[in-house]
Image (cartoon, rainbow, N blue to C red):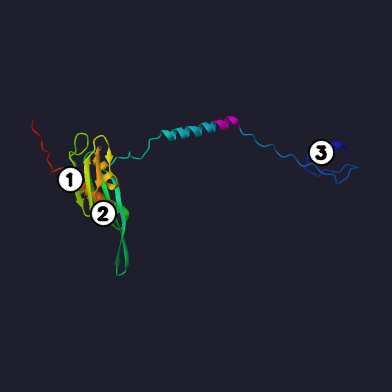
Amino acid sequence: MTTDDIKKVETEGGETPVAPGASSDAPVAAPASPAPEVADPVASMGNRDNRGGNRRNKERRPSRRDPRVKPEFDQKIVSLRRVTRVMGGGRRFSFSVALVAGNRKGSVGFGQGKAGDTPLAIEKAFRDAKKNMITVNATKDMSIPHDVEAKYASSRVKLMPAKGKGILAGSSARTVLEFAGLREIGAKFLSRSKNSANNAAATIKALQMLDTTKLKTRHK
């Protein structure tokens, strides 16, 4: 069999005959694997541009969320307690909240609320604070015209004008004075009570006493 006959048989799909004098155990060359496809760089660049365009379009879309409206009154919790009541069927838990609310422009209030869950108790306390809102009789430099002293439950507080010194107060009294919009004032607790709710209520009562107080004027 000639070399041309061997090539003809290979092209027709038959088995390759062994040439005379050659061993049949000789390794047969494996068929070559097809070459891997090469990605077109131009097409990939086009896809990247499209992705960038989609990202830009997404950024340009207006937000569907409504703008957040600033509340009229600021609020801060000064006391949060869990109250337990023993009933015939077991214990019942509720939450008691005391908070201070104000607009930082002369109006401030103190309220308390009690409910089975904390959000509802906070809402009740906020409604109570708005119901008991007072207007502070402040001076032009956002201070008080004179010293004033008030007592609520076991708390006793004294408010004094402090020109050029800012707010000199601690505990819940500082929260009340800040939410009332006062800037040059000092507060001192004359009692040893650490109850934040009572201290805040005493400060509110002291500010309320300024409305009924008249200053004496000296005639030259």
Q: Which residues are magenta?
A: 40-45
Q: Relative to residue 95, is residue 19 depicted above or below? A: above
Q: Which residue is mark 2?
A: 113
Measured Cα–Cα span from mark 1 to mark 3 = 115 Å
Horizontal side, residue 130 vs residue 216: left or right:
right
Quadrant, the N terminus: top right
Q: Residue at x 47, y 34 (%)?
A: 55
Q: Amino acid at mark 3?
A: Lys
Q: Which residue is mark 3?
A: 8
Residue 113 placement: quadrant: bottom left
Q: Amino acid at mark 2?
A: Gly
Q: Secondary structure at mark 2?
A: strand
Horizontal side, residue 195 vs residue 137: left or right:
right
Considering the whole magenta stretch, tell me its main secondary structure: helix
Quadrant, the C terminus: top left
Q: Is residue 129 something one can see in this rendering?
A: no
Residue at the far bottom in the pictured view: 88
Horizontal side, residue 35 vs residue 55: left or right:
right
Q: Which residue is mark 1?
A: 208
